[in-house]
Image (tube, helix red, strand yellow):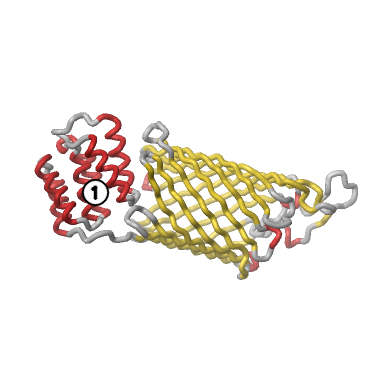
């Protein structure tokens, strides 16, 4: 049924002039409402789409597209009598062309069976090279400011170590309600060829729910996750996040949203590093033709739950992304992120008396080539530059990864 809903939107885009031949000029307000309804259909928010389409019909009773889309949604929700009433009204009021009549006939023949949850999943297998698996320090010694002795010398295990790795990851998304609430699972396992003590595995699960009040949109996400390192439990995580999209007057190609959230991280072997991080971030997204771009800027506040080295800290984040369609259906992607942290107090008084200041930058470039309708080949390069005022924490890394991805039909 979702395919029929999306197909109807495409047909209406082509056949709108004849369908709306008897309609009056609906004005910018009604057109915006109808576009919003189509976005709700594409995102699986059927209840929101129904409410919006009814508002469209109230403002413009001769809006043929709204009548047909509302009929299809009611059929998808199992409201057969209401769907049939709307189908009849569409046929009698607008004399739709053959393609629309065929779509209505197919919906009647299939029956209004009610809501059926959709599910999607993907599996990725990858092989990669990592120049600094252990995030080893650039400098083998630490010389405190003003010190005249030889300083601290790091053991070889704390210097950069190179290795190759294999990776498998999978994700699964399933509808939980007819109005777009989804549950998701994400899993990843990475095995190094020789440095097995740095093998890692992650598992995340969560629920994503869209909300709406008039023209205000809110999406809330609850996520729990665990990470293992070297085969032992390393970290547990709980995150609560909300993304608010206000009705800001912007061109159709732009969308602005504000995200706020809190993340609790519990290290299983590093009790003093547990903490809660709050984030407030604004994001601007651009979509037009074969191009997608986004930019976000945020503020971070990390509160230590125990006696963590350096105490509490605050910081900022910047993220830029650009994705575009290339010849041969290949997709290119460029990304840049920068995250800064400024600690509150000396990292380790008596040993490292400096207040830690960190700025991490990540550059990423990728190409995705479709092998078949549900198989992709991906190539990704990544560079990490972690700049710090405490030399033993400063490191650089470069990664190259080749992946094969299989998508569910």
Compared with 230, 385 (above or below) is above
Residue 237, quarter of picture: bottom right
Depth order, front residue of 155/93: 93
Which residue in the structure is indicated by mark 1?
7
What x and y, as percent, mark residue 234?
A: 62, 65
Q: In which quarter of the image is residue 293?
A: top left
Name above or below for residue 94 compared with residue 45: above
The N terminus - image quarter: bottom left
x%, y% of residue 82? 18, 52
**Residue at the (68%, 65%) spot, across then down:** 269
In what quadrant of the picture does the C terminus appear? bottom left
Question: From where the camera sits, is residue 387 visible?
Answer: no
Q: What element carries label 1?
A: helix
Residue visible at 52% across and 60% down in the picture = 224
Q: Which residue is drawn at 56% across and 65% down?
A: 201
Mark 1 neighbour density, 10 Å: few (under 14) some (14–19) many (20 or more): few
Q: Say whether residue 285 is left or right of residue 116.
A: right
In this rendering, would 309 be left or right of 274? right
């Amino acid at each position: 049924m979702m395919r029929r809903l999306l197909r109807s939107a495409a047909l209406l885009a082509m056949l709108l002039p004849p369908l709306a031949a008897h309609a009056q000029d609906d004005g910018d307000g009604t057109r915006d409402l109808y576009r919003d309804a189509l976005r709700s259909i594409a995102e699986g928010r059927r209840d929101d789409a129904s409410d919006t389409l009814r508002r469209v019909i109230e403002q413009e009773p001769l809006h043929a597209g709204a009548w047909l889309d509302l009929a299809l949604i009611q059929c998808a929700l199992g409201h057969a009598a209401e769907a049939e009433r709307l189908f009849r009204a569409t046929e009698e009021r607008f004399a739709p062309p053959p393609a629309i009549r065929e779509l209505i006939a197919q919906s009647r023949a299939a029956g209004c069976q009610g809501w059926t949850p959709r599910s999607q999943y993907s599996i990725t297998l990858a092989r990669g090279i990592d120049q600094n698996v252990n995030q080893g320090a650039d400098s083998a010694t630490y010389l405190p400011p003003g010190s005249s002795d030889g300083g601290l010398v790091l053991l070889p295990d704390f210097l950069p170590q190179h290795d190759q790795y294999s990776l498998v990851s999978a994700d699964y998304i399933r509808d939980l309600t007819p109005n777009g609430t989804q549950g998701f699972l994400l899993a990843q396992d990475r095995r190094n060829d020789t440095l097995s003590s740095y093998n890692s595995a992650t598992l995340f699960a969560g629920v994503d729910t869209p909300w709406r009040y008039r023209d205000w949109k809110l999406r809330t996400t609850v996520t729990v996750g665990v990470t293992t390192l070297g085969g032992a439990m390393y970290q547990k995580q709980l995150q609560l996040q909300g993304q608010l999209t206000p009705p800001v007057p912007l061109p159709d190609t732009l969308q602005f949203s504000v995200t706020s959230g809190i993340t609790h991280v519990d290290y299983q072997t590093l009790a003093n590093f547990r903490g809660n991080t709050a984030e407030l971030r604004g994001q601007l997204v651009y979509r037009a033709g074969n191009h997608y771009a986004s930019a976000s800027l945020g503020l971070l506040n990390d509160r230590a739950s125990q006696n963590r080295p350096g105490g509490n800290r605050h910081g900022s984040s910047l993220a830029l992304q650009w994705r575009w369609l290339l010849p041969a259906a290949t997709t290119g992607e460029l990304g840049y992120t920068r995250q800064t942290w400024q600690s509150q107090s000396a990292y380790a008084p008596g040993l490292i008396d400096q207040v830690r200041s960190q700025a991490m930058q990540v550059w990423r470039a990728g190409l995705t080539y479709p092998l078949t309708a549900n198989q992709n080949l991906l190539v990704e390069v990544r560079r990490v530059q972690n700049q710090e005022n405490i030399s033993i924490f400063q490191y650089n890394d470069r990664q190259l990864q080749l992946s094969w991805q299989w998508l569910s039909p």
